[in-house]
Image (tube, rainbow, N blue to C red):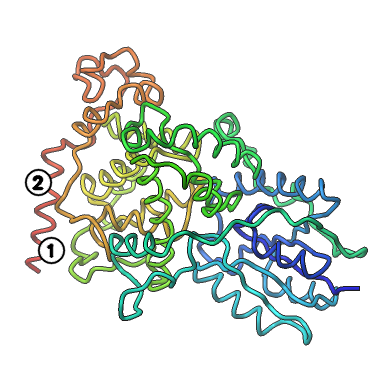
Amino acid sequence: MSKPQIVWLRRDLRLADNPALYAAAQAGPIIPVFVLDDERTGDRKYGGASRWWLHHSLESLGKSFGRHNAELILRRGDSVNILADIAAKTGAEAIHANRHYEPWWRKAQGDLKNALPDGCELVLHDGNYLMPPGTATTGSGDPYKIYTPFARAMREIMPPREELPVPETISQPSDLPSSDDLSDWKLLPTKPNWATGFAKHWEIGEGAAHERLDWWADNVDRYEDGRNLPSVDETSQMSPHLHWGEISPVQIWHALKGKRSEGWRTYESELIWRDYAQNVICQFPDYPHESYRDAIDDAKLWRNPNRGHVFEEELETWQRGRTGYPIVDAGMRQLWAIGWMHNRVRMIAASFLIKHLLIDWRHGERWFWDTLVDADYASNGTNWQWVAGTGVDSNMFSRIMAPLSQSEKFDAAGYIREWVPELADLSDAEIHDPPDEKRGKYPEKIIGHKEARERALEAYRAMKAG
């Protein structure tokens, strides 16, 4: 009788193309375990929107295991201590896990290797990205810092590995460790339940992810032209499914690889960007916390949050979608309503916070961490530093997006009507920058665009002058 094989699940909540699960099932009876670890994550424990998604994803995964007459074990606490204890009590031969690259998970993987009882080993697999970080390197073997050569190198070494099926046999030991009740974790909001819009918008789980991929396969060809138009649904909205590992990027790549359109090539670039973000945090683990560029002096450029109540009021105005700029407010309200925001609008909203309000990018990154269902440590930090001009590969700070012209250029009228209903009766010509007499209860601009632009550039010049 083969010894038990523990499968440590984190953001890989699927049965198909799960290398850790597949290897464990080949080796013997499995004990799949998910640990809600709010201890090792420190100040990076899952935000409210993420916890909502996680509840439903675990619920779906539990049912998937149930269809194979298997049980998913849920535990809460320090993942290393819990897994080592389960290994000791079950006589497990190995713990299989897909590698994670966030700094707390890298430390946990190292600590777990040293905490296991004799006769049990930690076996790490690569399963969450197109290629393991470190695969694409420069001619001298160094990791890339800039996206464009990284993407070129990735395409040269494609294709990714072949995808794996669901294990033919999923067996379990007759005596399983005890499991928490998912509802006891209280991941869902109740008083108030701010996630009613989430439930209406999203289908969650591995099956839902593949249904979305089937739809996307018929629409990806339009992505090149449609991805910047928030009023039309021509983005995949696969990001939360990818983040939680309900589907793998390898599965998506193989499903779409036969496409010959610019839409697919652009979408492939987005999948590669996701790998690039992991490449960045492997080199700079604190990237979502620390500005990379020495040329940016955080203390001199951003407004000091300790100087009074105005800073907090303006940050909250941005968070609530009350800035007086319809495209920014539509995005922030969409984020609050469904835990997701159109990518073009994410850039506009982020640029507005950083450059119109001169608020440190980290305040925005933290807000997105709490409110996005796809809040990803690497991608979120990389994207915010790109917009702020502080990143290893980023936009220049002096490039300041004009939200009013961006709204008109990308035909956001329908998007604004959906998320800023008090402006719904305005014409397409008026809705991007409503005239004062037609704003009604919609707020005035928190700051004029020209004034904000000049203030940001002056702050940048003053910082550079020392």
Residue depicted at 57% across the width and 67% down the height: 126
Q: Residue at x 56, y 50 (%)?
A: 251
The amino acid type, in three-letter code, at marker 1 is Met
- Above or below, 226 relative to 368: above
| Relative image position of residue 418 (x, y in whole percent) | 40, 23
Q: Quadrant of residue 313?
A: top left
User: Is residue 192 in sight in this rendering?
Assistant: no
Q: Name the residue nearer the viewer: 142 or 193.
A: 142
Q: Residue 22 versus residue 296: which sits nearer the camera?
A: 22
x, y (%) of residue 222?
37, 33
Residue 463 circle label? 1
Mark 1: which secondary structure? helix
Residue located 20% across and 42% down the image: 401
Residue ID for mark 2: 454
Q: Position of residue 46 (x, y in %)?
A: 56, 55
Q: Quadrant of the N terminus?
A: bottom right
Pinpoint residue 69: horizontal percent, then vertical percent: 86, 51
Q: Is residue 350 visible?
A: yes
Q: Considering the numbered disc 2 on the image, is that residue within a helix, a strand or a loop?
A: helix
Q: Is residue 275 left or right of residue 76?
A: left
User: The disc labelled 2 sits on which kind of residue?
Assistant: Glu
Alpha carbon distance from label 2 to label 1: 14 Å
Tell me: 239 left or right of 316: right
Q: Dot 1, crowdedness within 10 Å: few (<14), some or many (≥20)? A: some
Position of 235 with respect to 198 (left or right) is left
Q: Residues within 10 Å of mark 2 (few under 14, many from 20)?
A: few
Q: Is residue 326 left or right of residue 3?
A: left
The label on residue 391 is none
In the rendered view of the protein, which quadrant contains the C terminus? Answer: bottom left
